[in-house]
């Protein structure tokens, strides 16, 4: 799934960062309500992994 997000990033720069910010807000809102966090944590982890892969790539996609 992280690879899918990396491909999306090539088409829409900054999409991963934007989605990660949304995921963090969602996770915090759900945490406050006492609901299950597993889905939101996994979503955040996948987006974080994709973003870290892009940031560590010598050919940074943001330059495209």
Image: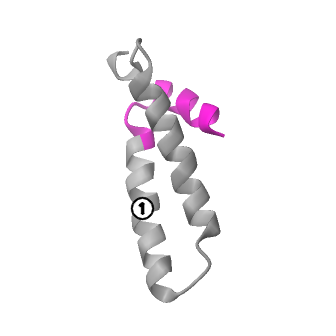
Quarter of the image with the N terminus is top right
Secondary structure mostly seen in magenta is helix
21 horizontally vs 30: left or right: left
Q: How many marks?
A: 1
Location of mark 1 (residue): 24
In the rendered image, residue 41, in percent from the top left (x then y), is placed at 56, 62
Q: Residue at x 38, y 43 (%)?
A: 17
Report the residue that reaches farthest toward the left. 63
For mark 1, give the secondary structure.
Answer: helix
Report the residue that reaches farthest toward the right. 1
Q: Quadrant of residue 29?
A: bottom left
In the rendered image, residue 38, in percent from the top left (x then y), is placed at 63, 68
41 shown above or below 28: above
Report the residue that reaches farthest toward the top. 59
Q: Start and end of the magenta stretch?
A: 1-16
In the rendered image, residue 43, in percent from the top left (x then y), is placed at 57, 55
Q: Residue at x 33, y 16 (%)?
A: 63
In the rendered image, residue 48, in percent from the top left (x then y), is placed at 48, 44
43 horizontally vs 23: left or right: right
Asked if residue 4 is among those painted magenta in the image, a careful observer would answer yes
5 shown above or below 36: above
Q: Quadrant of residue 64?
A: top left
Question: Residue 17 or 42: which is nearer the viewer?
Answer: 42
Asked if residue 3 is among those painted magenta in the image, a careful observer would answer yes
Question: Residue 59 or 9: which is nearer the viewer?
Answer: 59
Q: Residue at x 52, y 40 (%)?
A: 49
- Graded by Cα atoms within 10 Å as few (under 14), some (14 to 19) or many (20 or more), the crowding at tag 1 reads some
Figure colour scheme: one colour
């Amino acid at each position: 799934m992280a690879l899918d997000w990396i491909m999306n990033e090539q088409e829409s720069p900054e999409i991963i960062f934007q989605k990660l910010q949304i995921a963090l807000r969602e996770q915090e809102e759900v945490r406050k309500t006492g609901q299950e966090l597993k889905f939101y944590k996994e979503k955040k982890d996948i987006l974080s992994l994709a973003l870290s892969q892009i940031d560590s790539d010598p050919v940074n996609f943001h330059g495209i």
